[in-house]
Each structure stands twice: as C-alpha cells, then as structure tokens.
Image (cartoon, grey):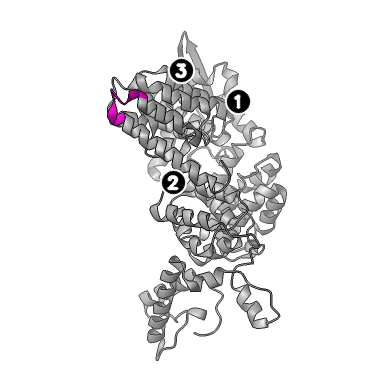
Amino acid sequence: MNEASNQTGSEVWQDLVSTALVGTDRRTPPDAGRFAAPGDNPAAALLSSAALMSAWRRAGSAGSAYSAELVGDQEESGDPAAAVRAAASAARDPRPLLSTATSARLTALVASRSESLPEYLEAAAKTGCRAPAELLPPLFDYARGSKAVRADLMTLAGPRGTWLAKQNQQWSTFTRYASAPDADAWSSDRPHERIGYLTWFRGKDPAAARALVEEVWDQPGHAAETRAAYVEAFAVGLGPEDEPFLEAALDDKSRQVRAETVRLLAALPGSRFAARMTERLHAWVEVITEGDAVLVKVRDQKLELTEDQVRDGIGEGWVQTEDERRLAKMQPSYWFEDLIASTPLSAWEHFGLSPARLLRSTAANRWEAAAGHRGWRSATLRQRDATWAEAFCAVNASGDMLELLPDEAAERWCLGVVADHRSQYSIHSAPIILSRLGRPWADPVCEALLAAIPKYLPNATRNDVARFFGMDNLAGRWMPPSFAPAVAAKADEIRAEQPLWAEDLDDLAAMLRDRALMLAELDVV
C-alpha cells in the first residue's frame, strides 16, 4: 500500500469507504499512496489509512500547514526529488499576494458569510493579486452554495485553486471556472475535468474546441452523460458552424444526447432544423382571430408522425412511459409543446400577430392552452428572444424572463413598476425586478426608489416596505455607496412620522458607508 498513487485525496477516501463497506475479504484495499499506513493485516492497514486520510481531510478544510505546503509556490531546483514533489502540487503563481488589509477583510467576510462577499470577491479579482493559500478552503466551501462567485474566486485562486479543486470531490466542478485550466485537462480520465476544459476552450476558440470533440466522439468509453455534457458545452460560442456536428448528433443512440442536441439546434434560427420545424408549424397549426379573440389550435387533420419528425424531437418516440405514449396518441397537443419549443419564434410572424397578443390567446382545449404557453416559454429561453421576454414580463414578471431583457429594457420596466403602480403588486415584485438590474444600480433607479417611499407608507406594513427595498439582500449590496447621504436624508425626512422605517433607512445608509470603506481598500471606488 505504500507505492505511489496517482489518485487525489478525495478519490482515495471514496475507495477506502467502498472497501470498508464490502469488507477486505471481498475487495483488496486501495493503493493509498502518500495516505498509506502500515498494519498487521489488510483490515488494520485499511483502518489506519482511513484514520490518516480523515485527519488530512479535516486539516485541508481548515487550511492547515500541510495543505498550504502542497498548494504553495515551488522554487526552481535541480533536485530531482524536488521536481517530483512539485509535480504533485500546484504550478507557481507569480502574482503578488493581496494586501494584509484585504486578506483580513476577506477572512472576516467569509467567517460571517456576509452578503457583501460576492461584490468584494469581484473587486478583489480585478486587482491582479492572488489570495493567500490558507483562505482558499473556506472560500471554496462558501462557493459550493454560490455559483455567481466561482469565476471571480478561481481568478483570485489561480493555479492553486485549480489544483486544490481537484483534490476535493465537492470542489471539483470549480475547475471549469478557472481562467486557464490545466493544459492536460482534456486528456484526463475524469469527465468533469474534460468538460470544464471544453467549456473554457469554447469561450476562447469554438472551432478548435469543436474539433477536439469530433476527434473523440466515436471513441469507446464515453458515457451518454459525458457526450451530453460535450453537447451542452457547445452553448458557449454556439454558431452556424456547429450545425453539421449537431445534425449528426441527432442520430446518437442516447435520448439524453439527442434532447440536448435539439435544445441547441432550436437556438440556431437559420439552421436546417429550424427550417424543418417552421414548415411543420405552418402546416399543423392554425391561428384564428375573431375581433379581439385569438384561438391557437392544431389543425383538424390526422397527423402521421414520420421517422424524421421523431428524429427532430416530436412525437411518441420521445416519451418515456406507457401512459405518456397513450396520451401522445390520443392528444396531438401532447407533443404540441415540443413543436413550439423547437421552432424559431420568428415563424409566428407568419400569422401577423404580436407576441403580446399571442400570449393572451386562448386554445381549443386545456391541453393546447398549457402546451402552447409552455412551448413559447421554452422557445424564448432557448433563443434568448428579448421581444418575447418583454411580452412575458407584461403577463408575469418572472426572473428568467427578466434576465433576457437588455439592460435598458430592464431598467425601464423596473422604473415603470416602482413609479406607476400604487398597489401591493409593486411592493412584492420590486425585489424580483431589482435583482435583474446590473450592479451597482443605475442612479435613476435609486432615485425612483427613494422618491417612492412616501407613496407606499400610508398603506404598507413595515415588512412590505422592507420587501420593497429588498433591504435584507439587495439595496444594501447593490445601491452605489455614493447614495449613503441621500438615504440618510430620506430617513431624516420621514423620522417624525415613521420612526421605525427611518431606522431601516439608517441601517441601509450605514451598510452603504461600510461598503464604501471596504471597496476603498481595493482602490476601486
């Protein structure tokens, strides 16, 4: 058990646990490499190795001297033994360390799980410095619950972070956010490392990344989940040049791969796939208008699905259970949703109606009504169509549709809700809409929020006003710190009549002043 092992710590631990579960008489204990320990028999050796490995895992999570040594810089040396040790640790990071004050601030923000941490990480990542090694484990644990911070964290962590993420299975997916993944990641035997590298490479050179996938696509040993993840990575830098590969992937034996392929082809409005779906939509669907009423329905005709239609994701060939298969035969509108979801939204211009009017349409029956709206929603998200997204927001301001709006449209929508409504709708919807805006919020939005306070006070509870501002998680983080004086002034203005709400504004002003000091440490204010 003392021979060198190429496994990472997390992989050794999993093997030790698996062997302990089935017993050493049925499974040979794994080669524990540097985590090995002597023992009188296999069972004793297994337990000793597990004890050492458990201590290593706990120490690594606390940023121990051992983990810092492995993650730390490696000085150049002519010693072959030193070269071997360096190969097992992170590449050298020449960037300077963050300042002592910045590191101390990061430590405090991580320990308190502060809501200001994402903003501070983003600002720190722009300094061109690296985070101290001992801060990486707690930062990585924090990032497990926050995808939004991972790219900035990996920038701060550098090659240390890429190395460290590979040592812990719970952090392993972070490698895909690295600014420069390991050059050998594509040849790794770990799928998540290859997928992370492919996603990164697609952002740099989509054509070259596609060539990598084409070289290995037919090689044995690639699970359906891995092939589907390869296709999913094509969403980064997706373009017409990817169409031939995706068309071929429609014939993959895995339903999972084909479904992912259909999703991407539906996002290419000029593709052959899009043309086929448009033709089917115009042949199978009719839109009837009578005055202001609009009826969207499947034409009254017998529809015989062919192999090429099933290949494109339509019909009972894509259902998974017998109940679904019976429904698909009885109700053509059961696959109506798939047809709409995979058809370019521009195909609906053929009927001469705006997206807003189509969304207010009725249907021939409840199947078509539900399927139609779900299909339009899926198509809007796939094609990232801002016009349809704004039409959906007019019906219901959902977060996923607000994300598709251009910044100008999102700001206009937010200002409209804040300024024009005098109801609970504004209070409850404002946090959803405000969360879509860029950071920091634009000055007109902040001014509108402060101006709106008197309009909401007469009929709103204290909790309503707190929700309106999102003070617990939005205004304190996303208002520009420069608005601290204006917030304090608004608090003084309402203090006599609404002292409790004035206290909330006092707290908000204090948060903005703290953020100003925090960001001043990084010279980004």
Q: Residue at x 36, y 26 (%)?
A: 492
Q: CA distance from mark 2 to mark 3?
A: 30 Å
Residue 346, disc: 1
Viewer-side residue, 391 vs 86: 86
Question: How many neighbours does mark 3 have within 10 angstroms: few (below 14), some (14-19), or many (20 or more)?
Answer: some
Q: Which residues are magenta?
A: 493-501
Write down the quadrant of residue 405 in the picture: top right
**Residue occupying image coordinates x 62% and y 33%:** 274
Q: Report the Cα–Cα distance between label 1 and label 2.
A: 30 Å
Q: Residues within 10 Å of mark 2 (few under 14, many from 20)?
A: few
**Which amino acid type is shown beneath numbered disc 3?**
Leu
Residue visible at 40% across and 89% down in the picture: 41
On screen, 303 above or below 230?
Answer: above
Magenta-span inclusion, residue 499? yes
Q: Which residue is mark 3?
A: 295
Residue pointed to by mark 2: 320
| Left or right of 435, for residue 215 | right
Seen at 69% across and 47% down, the residue is: 206
- Asked whether, in this view, residue 185 is left or right of residue 317, the answer is right
Q: Which residue lies most toward the bottom here?
A: 40
